[in-house]
Image (tube, rainbow, N blue to C red):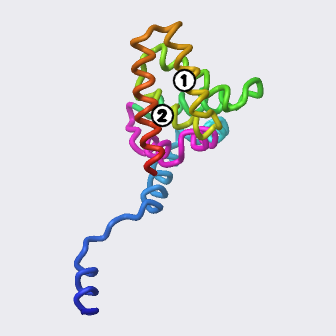
Amino acid sequence: MAKATTKAAAAKPAVKKPAAKKAAAQKEGATRPEYASEMFAKGLEMRRSVLGAAYVDGSLARADDFMVDFQKLVTEYCWGDVWTRPGLDRKHRSMLNIAMLTALNRGNELKLHLRGALTNGVTRDEIKEILLQTCIYCGIPAGLDAFKHAVEVFKEVDSQ
C-alpha cells in the first residue's frame, strides 16, 4: 500500500507553493527599473502592510509596459507620500477611504479598502457607522451597495 501511495504522489504534477508564487511575484514585479526609487520602496512597504503582500505583489507582477507607470504613481504618491504622512494614522485614513469610495461607487476598490480597514483596526461597528453616514450624504443606493460589499468582505474574512 505504501508503494501505491508513493507512486500516486510521484505522478502528481508539481504545484508551486504559495510562498514560491509570492517570491516570484516580488522578484518579477519589484525589480523593474521604474520601481527603483526610495519613495517606491517606502510606498511598497505601506501598501503591503495595509492591503496584503499577496495582493500588492500580484498587482506589480501583472503590470505590463502600459500599466507600470500607473503602479509606480500609485505606490510612490498614494502609498509612499500621502499614506505615510504624520497628520492622520492608518485607521483614520482607512475610514476616509471607505466613505470616499462609497461616494464614488467604486465597489472593487471599496472591498479592497474594507479589508485594509480591518487590518488597520477599524471595527465592523465603525464601518457600519461610516456607511450609515454615507447613506445620508451620498444617497441610499450608494450606501446600499457599500453595505452589500461590506457583508461580502466580512463573510470572506470570517471564512479564512
Q: Residue 3 placed where, x, y %?
A: 25, 92
Q: Which residue is mark 2?
A: 112
Of 126 and 75, nearer the camera is 126
Can residue 42 be found in the magenta stretch? no
The boundaries of the magenta stretch are: 44-66
Instruction: State the image coordinates of residue 27 (x, y, percent, origin top left).
Output: 49, 54
Q: Earlier in the sequence, mark 2 or mark 1?
A: 1
- Pointer 1 local density, CA inside 10 Å: few below 14, some 14–19, many at least 20: many
| Residue 70 locus on image (x, y percent) | 47, 28
> Nearest the camera: 140 or 36?
140
Q: Is residue 129 left or right of residue 144?
A: right
Residue 48 is inside the magenta segment: yes
Q: Residue at x 63, y 43 (%)?
A: 45
In this rendered view, identify the residue nearer to me: 135 or 37.
135
Q: Which residue is mark 1?
A: 98
Q: Residue at x 25, y 74 (%)?
A: 12
Query: Is 25 left or right of 132, judged from the image as shown?
Result: left
Q: Is residue 81 visible?
A: no
